[in-house]
Amino acid sequence: MTSVFIDELDASTYAAYAARPGSTLIIPTGATEQHGPHMPLGVDAMLSKDIAAAVAQKLGALVAPGFSYGYKSQPRSGGGNHRTGTTSLGATALMALTEDVVSSFMTQGFENIVVLNGHFENYQFLYEGIDNATAKMRSAGSRARAVLLSYWDFVDDDTLARVFPEGFLGWDIEHGGVLETSLMLLLRPHLVDMSRVENHPPATLTAYDIFPEDPARTPDSGCLSSATGATADRGQLLLDAITGSIAHALRGELAEPSVLT
Amino acid sequence: MTSVFIDELDASTYAAYAARPGSTLIIPTGATEQHGPHMPLGVDAMLSKDIAAAVAQKLGALVAPGFSYGYKSQPRSGGGNHRTGTTSLGATALMALTEDVVSSFMTQGFENIVVLNGHFENYQFLYEGIDNATAKMRSAGSRARAVLLSYWDFVDDDTLARVFPEGFLGWDIEHGGVLETSLMLLLRPHLVDMSRVENHPPATLTAYDIFPEDPARTPDSGCLSSATGATADRGQLLLDAITGSIAHALRGELAEPSVLT
Amino acid sequence: MTSVFIDELDASTYAAYAARPGSTLIIPTGATEQHGPHMPLGVDAMLSKDIAAAVAQKLGALVAPGFSYGYKSQPRSGGGNHRTGTTSLGATALMALTEDVVSSFMTQGFENIVVLNGHFENYQFLYEGIDNATAKMRSAGSRARAVLLSYWDFVDDDTLARVFPEGFLGWDIEHGGVLETSLMLLLRPHLVDMSRVENHPPATLTAYDIFPEDPARTPDSGCLSSATGATADRGQLLLDAITGSIAHALRGELAEPSVLT
Amino acid sequence: MTSVFIDELDASTYAAYAARPGSTLIIPTGATEQHGPHMPLGVDAMLSKDIAAAVAQKLGALVAPGFSYGYKSQPRSGGGNHRTGTTSLGATALMALTEDVVSSFMTQGFENIVVLNGHFENYQFLYEGIDNATAKMRSAGSRARAVLLSYWDFVDDDTLARVFPEGFLGWDIEHGGVLETSLMLLLRPHLVDMSRVENHPPATLTAYDIFPEDPARTPDSGCLSSATGATADRGQLLLDAITGSIAHALRGELAEPSVLT
Amino acid sequence: MTSVFIDELDASTYAAYAARPGSTLIIPTGATEQHGPHMPLGVDAMLSKDIAAAVAQKLGALVAPGFSYGYKSQPRSGGGNHRTGTTSLGATALMALTEDVVSSFMTQGFENIVVLNGHFENYQFLYEGIDNATAKMRSAGSRARAVLLSYWDFVDDDTLARVFPEGFLGWDIEHGGVLETSLMLLLRPHLVDMSRVENHPPATLTAYDIFPEDPARTPDSGCLSSATGATADRGQLLLDAITGSIAHALRGELAEPSVLT
Amino acid sequence: MTSVFIDELDASTYAAYAARPGSTLIIPTGATEQHGPHMPLGVDAMLSKDIAAAVAQKLGALVAPGFSYGYKSQPRSGGGNHRTGTTSLGATALMALTEDVVSSFMTQGFENIVVLNGHFENYQFLYEGIDNATAKMRSAGSRARAVLLSYWDFVDDDTLARVFPEGFLGWDIEHGGVLETSLMLLLRPHLVDMSRVENHPPATLTAYDIFPEDPARTPDSGCLSSATGATADRGQLLLDAITGSIAHALRGELAEPSVLT
């Protein structure tokens, strides 16, 4: 039995890998969040899982079960937590989940833990969870290390120019837009219905947040920009750039990730 | 786009279902835990997900993304938390995760939430999370209800007699044994390697727990009994009994679950 | 001054005992919970205290002040948390109480801590508290150990057959039934009024929990089965079996418990 | 069955009382703490329980199971948390315990909850727990009220002059001294051994606390002053003053406490 | 007595303002964090306070005592939490502080609460605290609203071009750089020593975070870019742009902020 | 750049001081709380800061940014938490804030941390925070120590007699009274308006607390006694006594506090 996903591995195979020098585990983190009328609720969880698997294959690393629920969707990056379909964790739950899972994997012998984030709002709470786990494990004598990243931070300017020929307007409005839709068209095409994409202008975002949320500020579609230009080809450009760049970075950070054979 | 799994549904389809009278959502909860040399780490998460889907199809209900990580494996039901492959949450994380997710789904309009548990150790912490969520939602005016169950509690005596013709020794030793292996042989056969099943006597369990755990008391295989007698046919007997019985119970409790059309 | 109860011991006598090899302390945990019209609210706290004292005397161990309040009464084991008289802790309070008390006793030198539970619903939260305390103390260099048990798990089949000649129907319906009432008739007879025992059939329990609780599913008496057959003689059979069996198990686990002289 | 202690009452009797206008419940709070060589560890729990019972009898109120464990003993009021025999809770546990217990009793119908404190260090954490419980219950529509007091605050100057004819030096040094010992000689004489009282001068307390504690600043006896002058007669003076004064105050605050008949 | 700072106002004046329609309170949030050899530890707290005061004067609003301590400094925005002088809160403390303070001000009658952030790492934890406070207050019937912003998000492109004539390289490297130093030269010139500014190239930041932090990746100066180009004139450009733009945005959001007269 | 306040020091100067043997840091803790019609909301924060600075100058120590928000004002010491202007933290927030800040400073090298309290209600929560921080740091190998004090505990009887020639009635009624007003007249005279002092008798305080608070028991002024006798001269007497006595005590406790040069 072999797989890049640890939930499909038996304990012996898994234990043998975890005990090797350079053993590396990638934890994908997403959300359950509306992504417009043309894409399913699981986009963030699916993309982080698929990208994690692609990176793991490049490195010879393994992939842990992902986080299916994420921090509250915020209006300026995900359309807001008031939209039906968006199912969220508070900060305390997400931090505790992260700290426990990262500590547990470090205890089992992994030398490198990579948390690969696919939901913008998660980042700081993942940071706190990993930081606390690492501090606890260090004080218990572990030498394990961790890396935290969001996959879109690995898209280079050249790729951006090819995917957004009319100009890139910023990651904040990409919720349900060309980036995510192109990747989904490539990776999970049966879950995308391009006929339902609405062609509306990008959302005008304020430079601040208001409480309680004002539903009127999120476009009806739930997307912060239109996915009209999304194609599987653009998805391939993005996926190649992202996985190549993440793998390159991790090779540099982690020296020699071990390979599961 | 239609699916029993909400992460594969678009937000509009999902919202329309959640708003209906009798809307019902099943949340499967499992664990990442060693299950012997012949089965993968994801057994509890996979079985709870598959059973949830089968029940949902009978009822016309939906299935939420499951909990991939569960409470600490205990020696008397899961072999113990010290085994490599077993990756666990503390009580605080699991309770917070449960409370937030259940509250969030209730807020979105579901009238019935069913938490379908596949990892013995989770039960009381799921209970606390659901109880707190329900109390909070009731005080906010919601009329939503919730049900908590573990799937093995729905195996009737007749089925038990057919699956364990030599006599049933108790659920506590079924970790990695005939029950789980038969279901996996039916539902995820490519992830089971019967040639690696060890034929050892059932573990002798104490009537108490000790701290810290004593690894010597768990059989080397990590299973509390041998899966030698497991077959896909027995898995089918179990699955039919379990899903039939759960669906019957839920129909009684929830009156008319709405059907996604 | 000598007593098996530490709250009746002066600090010098106590400290001398705690410092000995094999020093053993039993912490009884109960609840404040309705137990039908014929028994007082303190049944679980009283029985766990009395059994702890009897075991301590056999072993030469000491008994700590018990936990008078327990986790929320659940309908399938205690009639439910909605009944007047039932006064409960949430999980967080019970786990924190357990962790702090166990840590504190370990810090003072006890080598063996036994938590003797008398309220079904407490078990998993006691487990978490003890597990966290043990982990913390181990990382601080302590070699102390702990044992967690519920007293009814030590009733052997032979005793069961003598106490329930018409057949034993399961521990779940024993709330306010023959087991507890017989023990109370033996140990605290002035607090039992057998003339108020109602002769109703055992409660029909579901295989699942519902939220919020449905008061109609608990018998009016608050008992899950009738205590009609309870006698002090049966209480003596039970007490002998329970204390003998617990003492035997602890002697095996704890090697040589020290004796307070 | 009748008793001032609710753990000795059956649920029906209890429920009938709780439902009456003016129903009043007293919760005694103590500690498990060294009290010198002449007194047992349970002094604070015993005295708060006995005083609560005496007050309850004057008022016709009931007494709940007390808190046997209290906040960390502080050097300037209890000799310090480093002394063997002193078994303490952190703030979080004590606050959660208080909030849950007070909320639970208010939910059951009590109109007046009195927390009667017998361990100096508990006060502010009890305050927080009661304040949070009251706020929560008020927002749920309850009109229940609560009172928090420490029993020594009800000793009047005249009594003080009679109990301490050589002059009263302040409550802070009374740990294990004349006040507590006199009350114990009256209420639990078999647990006091006056032959072991050490005649040492009162401890010289600093005006500040240091961390970590310095064991050298606590007298070897563990008492902050000598109990040499303690007698049961003085205990009677104190008890009369305390219970009379508390009952008087509660009658004024709570209007007409209901009487259990 | 009049002041824009509430800690300098008497309770009567304050209460009269809070009770008015449109009453608005600004809470500045900063950090205690190293800012290179040329600036003091209090830069984030000072700048958020001064900017809040300037905005409050434009609006007629008040300013609350600021948060002097912030979330852990992160290497990619503040040089990292390992640097001496950087004194940080964990997420739990910062979220609790925010929730309590915002709730408390809303309870006192303020209709508008503005949290004006001056430390990048704080944002998501402030968000969670404000979101929880707002939800709690809404369920208690309050109509108060809140706004969260970071002041640098209000610098327009034109100002940016004038302050960074050689090109703006991104906010992430502005820790201890031209932005903060220019503002300090304008607002607290006696606390800046330009002779100690080091002329080093901007830090090369990774696209990810590593745990534990690697001190070697932060420039020796502790600044992520050099403040060589900082001047009070540029500070004035920035201050005018920031305060004008924030005041404009708040006027739009909050309708008519009340004026303290 | 030199200052007794660390927020005005650059990181290099600060780090050099923290690394010295005997390095000492004082953290002032106050509140935002109504102090009658004649004084501002910041009295507790201002006085603790000013006294900390005066003590630091005597010792050669440094002063950290203070805590501007404190625990809930209690009716018997601060007039109560219901008064407008009183802005408070719950226990959890204050304890977490204290633990994190004290830990953080100890990690940076300070050998002595002094928490100088200016708000009565804070004390026990500061105690818990410091105790937890110290325990954590000790287990991590630190030898740092901490001191906790409230400044009014350092006023000697002689000074008391001179400041209160008509007799001192107890610290509990000094909220907004002669002590605080005299110190403010000395230290921040522009923030005191003696013409608004009301001449009312001292509040009659109960020996217990009630929940919820009864606003009618606090004098309309918000002060628990009248500040009529307050003068700057009396403030000087108090300040000299307090700072002299604290400095003397700290010199004794901390051996040789290092001096910032």
Image (tube, coloured by chain):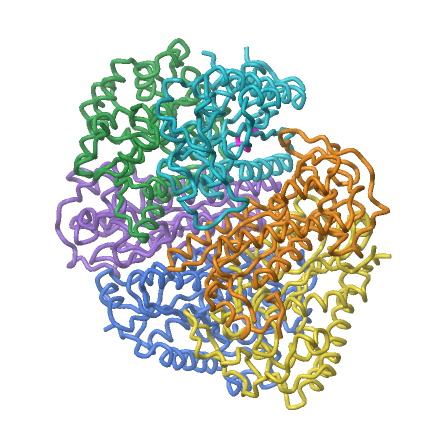
Chain colours: A orange, B yellow, C blue, D purple, E cyan, F green
- Position of residue B170 in the picture relative to residue F237 (left or right): right
Residue E16 seen: no
Residue extending furthest toward the top: F195
Which residues fall within the magenta stretch?
A: E102-107
Task: In this rendered view, identify the residue nearer to me: E117 or F17.
Answer: F17
Q: In the rendered image, which quarter contains the N terminus of chain B?
A: bottom right
Q: Position of residue F121 (x, y in %)?
A: 38, 34
Q: Residue at x 37, y 75 (%)?
A: C54
Q: Is residue D211 left or right of residue B213?
A: left
Reply yes or no: does residue E104 show up in magenta.
yes
In screen coordinates, is E209 left or right of D155?
A: right
Q: Is residue D57 visible?
A: yes
Q: Quadrant of residue B54?
A: bottom right
Query: Vertically, is F90 above or below E46?
Result: below
Q: Nearer the viewer, residue E189 or B232?
A: E189
Q: Is residue D77 above or below residue B5?
A: above
Query: Percent x, y for residue C100?
Result: 39, 57
Q: Nearer the viewer, residue F89 or C209?
A: F89
Between E235 and D124, the one nearer to me in the picture: E235
Q: Main secondary structure of the magenta part?
A: helix
- Residue D154: name its quadrant: top left
